[in-house]
Image (cartoon, rainbow, N blue to C red):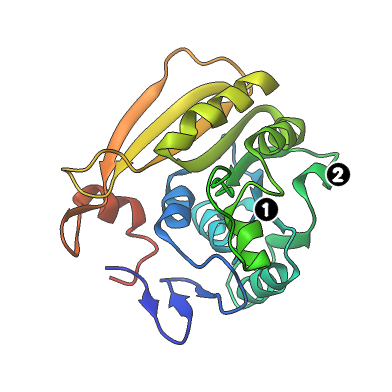
Amino acid sequence: MSPKMANDYFQFRKFTVHQHRCAMKVGTDGTLLGAWAEAPVIPCRILDIGTGTGLIALMMAQRFPMAHIVGIDIDGDAVSQARENVMESPFSNRINILQTDAAMLQDTDGFDAIVSNPPYFADSLTSPNAQRTTARHGVSLSFEALCASAFRLLKNNGLFSVVVPSDGRSRLEAAARLEGFFLSRVCLVRTTPQKPPKRQLIEFRTQPVNELDITEGVIEISPNARSPWYQQLTQTFYLR
């Protein structure tokens, strides 16, 4: 079952995500990435680029109890909303939300893992709402800029995990390869068994891998019936 929604907030099992001041609301993409992305070492430092409501940062904090997480966003309303969501959570002492561009972030310690649900509608019409345009389109954060920042900020042997629509994978891979990333893990996600993969969860590493790990997942086996794969992936977050 999906998390409970009322008055523009989502109630997960261990935290609540308010979203009335954010352009991009809680959605399947962010939930998938937060449940799927890995961290290479414990304890670890994790960076969430384009944190929005703080959803993925909160999910990573729940999954990795010894992780310290930094979430960044350029939108002031999103940053203040994410900070409030973090402060109300049981993970407030391990998550720091900053208002900054990834390209401007300076961090001498480096991160073990970076996650991002990026703005990827670079080829579509922009929204008349400036805040929503920033969140949804590659206006301020292109794949090239995202990959360059991720590679610069990652530690050696770090992981970089992203969720993109299937038609954006080739552009993302090209940008990542140019920076020196190696493709390591991919999950092709179908909405239903009959439909082609709509989105892809993609993991890159800073070091070569012996074998590419490719899997598939289905969200619903029938209308309003979550698949066993999706239930298992998200079972620690949803109320039921």
Q: Residue at x 55, y 49 (%)?
A: 117
Q: Earlier in the sequence, mark 2 or mark 1?
A: 1
In the figure, residue 156 lies in which quadrant?
top right
Residue at mark 2: 106
Residue 128 seen by the camera: yes
Residue plotted at (53% across, 41% down): 162
Note whether 236 is above or below 172 in the view shown. Answer: below
**Given this view, does label 2 or label 1 mark the residue nearer the observer?**
2
| Circle 2: residue type | Gln
Give 172 or 158, whichever is nearer the viewer. 172
- Asked if the residue under mark 1 is in contact with the one under mark 2, i.e. CB atoms within 8 Å, the reply is no
Q: Report the disc number at residue 68.
A: 1
How many numbered marks have been drawn onto this rendered protein structure?
2
Where residue 194 sits in the image (x, y, percent)? 16, 43
69 displayed left or right of 153: left
Badge 1 amino acid: His
Q: Position of residue 63 (x, y in %)?
A: 49, 53
Vertical arrangement, residue 7 with respect to residue 132, above or below: below
How far across and how far down the image is residue 130, in percent?
A: 67, 65
**Hey, which quadrant is residue 176 in on the image?**
top right
In front here: 1 or 129? 129
Classify mark 2: residues with Cα within 10 Å, few (<14), some (14-19) or many (20+): few
* Residue shown at the point (54%, 56%) measured from the top left: 56
Residue 130 or residue 70, whichever sits in front:
130
